[in-house]
Image (spheres, rainbow, N blue to C red):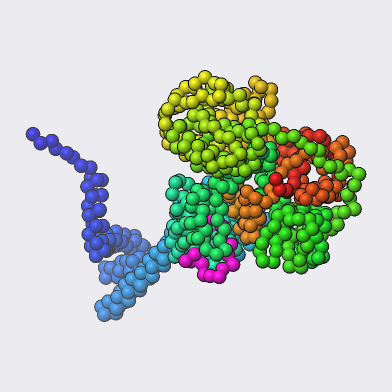
Amino acid sequence: MAQQHTTSLRLRLRYRFDNLVAGGTAPLIGWLAAACLTVVVPASAVLVWADRAAPTTLSGRLTAVWVSVGQTLKVGGAVGSPLYVLASVTLALVALLFVSTLVSLITTGINQRIMSLRRGHSTVLEAGHTVVLGWSDQIFPVITELVAANANQRRRAIAVLAPKDKVDMEDEIATGLGGTGVRPGPGGTGARPGTRTGTGTTRIICRSGPTTDPTVLARLSPQTSKAVLVLPPDGDAGDAHVVKTLLALDAALPRPRDTVVVAAVRDARNHLTAKLAAGPGGHVLCADEIIARLLVQTARQPGLSLVYQELLDFDGDEFYTASAPGLAGRTFGEALLAFTTSSVVGLLHADGRVVLNPDTGTEIDADDRIILVSEDDDTAVPEPAGPWVDEDAIVTARPRSRHAERLLLLGWNRRAPLVVEQLDEFAGPGATLDVVALGDGAARRSAAEVAAARGRLEVAFHSGDITDPDVLAKLNVPSYDSVIVIGETDREGTAPAAAPPGADPPAPAPAPHPEDGSGTDDRTLVTLLHLRAIGEAAGCELPLTTEMSDDGNRLLAPARAGADFIVSGRLISLLMTQISESGHLADVFAELFRAEGSEFYLRPAADYVRTGREVAFATVVESARRRRECAVGYRLRAQTATAPAYGVRLNPDKRQRVRFGEHDWVVVLAEN
């Protein structure tokens, strides 16, 4: 027996209404007119018959009902001859149709415009703005630094284009900036009018679309922008996407162009391709090479990461260039003491060539610009500092004996071969490097290939899990002169781990699993936790340099205050923003990060001035000048655990007097 199903009246009526709507416009209008008359005519009759002032005759009342219906339905309700009434109703219906159509068109147009603005498809009409293409975690430090750079300027704008929802981008930026809000551009959403925001006078304009489409790029008016930054997206295909974006940008930007184009790629193998895609005047940073270089420099010079952090962000002192007509014809050595509140480090020649720490006898031409470290571009004012030099306080550096260094590298990724190469360039006689990482396949082969090409550094690879406390305990970590921890991303194999020299065989390595940047940092944090325990047990401070991907994880790191961290994403973001503000800084940083030439060092203050007595910093500058070095600051050991500077003071006033101890350092730009 078939089961009977009962359907409620509400569902049946809804079903019939749905069918009516699906039938088209004409039936819908007819049914709406019938439903309207069914309600309006009886209601009008009730109103007329209930009105004491209504006509007494039936024809008069029917006429009053017609007038009420006509006024209600906006069809006039005129009375008179049948032809007059027909013409009146026709005109009223035509007017009603016209007005309804006009209102519908206006409403549709406004809705489409609102939706277009909310989707981020409108054109940005700005000039002198900064364009940011792409989306990754680097977007937050980039915007933060650009806002800081624009703090003393009015009506600045940052236009962001990414294949994300516009409202989502604005919300994420507001959250990433500490919840301070986003000042939206035209068609934007975010902070309410009059609300104080953390972006100051800078407006952040978000647009949605692919960064590889020249037509979409044109919406951000890159031809009138001051700079364009191309961020590498997360993932293995990030570098290829950067190259495609640069090609699209080259098609969208006319040549010759004044706009500064800055991009970054991760893999060194893609660097040349990206430079070709960027075209003349484009600046492409290779993240792997820069990070590897800084890891090695910092491992050899503890505290150097703090120096670069101070130089690269816009909160303290940065690199600037200044014209100095009064120095034309004088030597670079004389220029070192020609500025009291700025630290001279090099020359920018008229042909665009950058020379850091040139010979002190180099003559300055009239068209040369001075490269210096200063608080702002308007603080680079010449003022002689020579009168504050204390000749009696200048000393000669004491000879220091060099011993065979023992270095330890924990972890292995695609940057590790570059790190080994850099370590070999600075290695002295008898220097050794022990590498401990998971896997014994590609990592071991890569280490062997690098070691075979090196001439001074003896490299030994040991397979082991750096998050295993037993593996770390058997390494005798305190015996190493320097320890570098890098994120393991190329994990492989489950082969038994080879023991370090003199150690028992460790447990088998765990099976590999996929990891992202966050997972890599998680393993690094575990390793640091075990290293801290080892240092505390040995009663010493380990000479540790750590690479991390996320700056937020650095705050969680179980390490001493002021420890050396190289945060890859933030570092590249800071470099890109610095170059976007001053294109010539690309050559300055290229000079700093290349193997040859001068770089920053932290050297004992006792090698420059007498300790235990107050001396003006101008005395340190003069002492460094005689050693063909540029002194730019110092670090006090007593303040190495005190935030936020951790004892580092860059570009002090040369008249400032400071008392150095035996264990304090001077920050100098010098050749190795």
Residue at position x 54%, y 32% in the image: 460
Verify whether residue 256 appears in magenta. Answer: yes
Q: Which residues are magenta?
A: 250-263
Whole-percent x, y for residue 161 in the image? 49, 57
Residue at position x 51%, y 51% in the image: 265
Whole-percent x, y for residue 485 in the image? 57, 34
Image quadrant in which the N terminus is located: top left
Locate residue 603 relative to residue 191 in the image: left or right. Answer: right
Residue at position x 78%, y 55% in the image: 360
Residue 172 or residue 115, whichever sits in front = 172
Q: Is residue 469 shown above or below 146?
A: above
- Asked where in the image residue 50 lies, by quadrant, the reply is bottom left
Whole-percent x, y for residue 393 in the image? 89, 43
Whole-percent x, y for residue 57 in the image? 28, 69
Locate residue 194 relative to residue 447 in the image: left or right. Answer: right
Residue 86 or residue 552, whichever sits in front = 552
Q: Is residue 624 shown above or below 102?
A: above
Image quadrant in which the C terminus is located: top right
* Residue 475 showing in the rendered view: yes
- Asked where in the image residue 20 lies, by quadrant, the reply is bottom left
- Asked where in the image residue 368 lies, by quadrant, the reply is bottom right
Residue at position x 64%, y 29% in the image: 480
Q: How many marks?
A: 0
Residue 45 or residue 497, whichever sits in front = 497
Locate residue 135 relative to residue 378 in the image: left or right. Answer: left
Locate residue 240 relative to residue 646 in the image: left or right. Answer: left
Verify whether residue 639 appears in magenta. Answer: no
* Residue 372 showing in the rendered view: no
Q: Residue furthest left?
A: 1
